[in-house]
Image (spheres, rainbow, N blue to C red):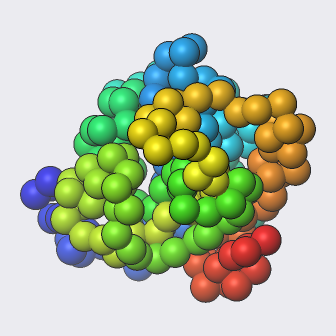
Amino acid sequence: MWQFLLNLFKKESPQDEQDTMKKYLIVGLGNIGAAYANTRHNIGFKILDHFAAQENLTFETQKLGDVATYKLKGRTFIFLKPSTYMNLSGKAIVYWLTKENIPLENLLVITDDLNLPFGSIRVKTKGSDGGHNGLKDTQLKLNTVAYNRFRFGISDAFNKGQQVDYVLGEWTDEENDKLKERLDKSIELIKSFGLAGMNITMNTFNGK
């Protein structure tokens, strides 16, 4: 943690600083293992996998996660699927921010959200963890609530006491039919984050 904070404030040459500002860490939250692959809680993994399939990217297993690199118009996007399980997502995020010397404002964390209708998109620059264990650990490890997050709505269509089963349950056939368009929209959002910036991305995609 201390090394990460030191990296944020260390002096860089103008060229180093320029290169750093063109690197982005895109983190999809989820749980590893085939049993979780098509669950609602793993939408972060699913979005990055969809992006990788569209752009012929290959994820490689590295320290604390599976990683792929994508270059677009002078920007470098590092995609991370943490292998720490959801509850320790922040550990992987801090490690890769530090390793790649990526500024906090160039981090985007993708997560599921029960409070949004299915497929709804919300992009924010800060906020509470909302009871989400992945965001809770990220907030704890970064020691701030001010980091960019992309919340993908999974709705709250479950009966009382069935939240865990719902979140860790698989998409319905109807949801799967609609997911392709939502995943394509998510790819557009990620590209916009790197190319156009957070403010334009929020104005363009929130509620879409």
Looking at the image, residue 53 lies above or below residue 35 = below
Residue pictured at 80% horizontal, 40% vertical = 175
Image quarter of residue 121: bottom right
Q: Can the viewer see residue 117 in this picture?
A: yes
Image quarter of residue 101: bottom left
Is 180 left, or right, of 137 in this rendering?
right
Is 35 left, or right, of 12 in this rendering?
right
Looking at the image, residue 32 lies above or below residue 182 = above
- Of the pair 165 and 106, the residue shown nearer to us: 165
Residue pictured at 71% horizontal, 69% vertical = 192
Q: Quadrant of the C terminus?
A: bottom right
- Residue 126 in percent (x, y) is at 40, 75
Number of marks drawn: 0
Residue pictured at 61% horizontal, 85% vertical = 199
- Of the pair 190 and 55, the residue shown nearer to us: 190
- Residue 176 in percent (x, y) is at 82, 35
